[in-house]
Image: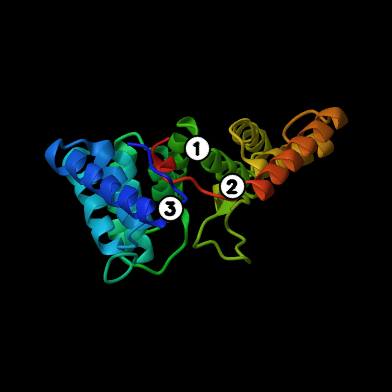
Amino acid sequence: MAYNLKSESEVKEYVKNLGIEYRFGCYSEKKPEVCHLLADFLESIKKDYEKAGKVYKNNCDEYKYGKSCLKYGTYSLLGKGTKKSDFKVAYDYFEKGCNLGEPDCCLNQGLLLITKNDRPELEQDVIRGMKLLQKACSGKNANACYYLSGMYIVGVKKSDTSSNSTDKSKSDQFDVPKDMKKAFQYALEGCNLGNMYSCANLSQMYAKGDGVAKDDKLAEKYKNVALEMQKDVQSNKTLTFQEGLS
């Protein structure tokens, strides 16, 4: 049936039927991708975050659908549709999604481990966190590649290293020593995957000869690539319903 989406009554009918279709596909046909769409529908159209969260959680637990693990992990982290924020629950669902091959989950799980926090239930572990970022980057997550590049650009100091320490060598003070060659490699990968900040960093590396041979032409090339990406972001700020499945 064709709907006239300029008619308010027909729009309401369309939305109602869409909800019925998603519920049937999820609960009767037990299709994980449709359950995820049902949760998206409850979130975006109905604004019922509690019900949406329950559907995401069940779809992750019962049907092992990685994108739903990502959503429920995010809900738990933000306290959205739940009574309060719970970093440990968020971490557990990001871990489930990562193990199911969802790169965004690996990114979030890694960032929770890398970020310094005062939560006893989630101990900081930079090295393990970086391995998860590497897994996410290998899974074509551009942001993970960018974060890895940034960590190698500046290095990551040990949390217990005193600024006036004299009994340790400089390299011993770092969990992750500065490494501009690795920084360049991850920046290149991030840029190729569409991260404009990685492209901007590439431009600077080529301009200065950091981690790669100095090359003014390539510096200008990646500067222009980053600027084009910035224009695209500014001119295309809308999100499309159902794009979470792409």
Q: Is residue 122 visible?
A: no
Say which mark, if any, is on residue 141. 1
* Residue drawn at x 41%, y 53% as measured from the top left: 113
Up-down: is 10 above or below 47? above
Q: Which residue is mark 2?
A: 151
Q: Position of residue 5 (x, y in %)?
A: 44, 47
Q: What's under tag 2, amino acid-wise?
A: Met
Residue 144 percent across, percent down from the top left: 52, 42
Name the quadrant containing residue 188.
Answer: top right
Q: Name the kind of residue labelled 1 in the image.
A: Asn
Left or right of 94, for residue 173: right
The residue that label 3 is drawn on is: 7
- Residue at coordinates 34% horizontally, 42% vertically from top-left? 67
Q: Is residue 76 above or below residue 218?
A: below
Foreground pick, 64 / 110: 64
In which quadrant of the rendered view does residue 105 lie? top left
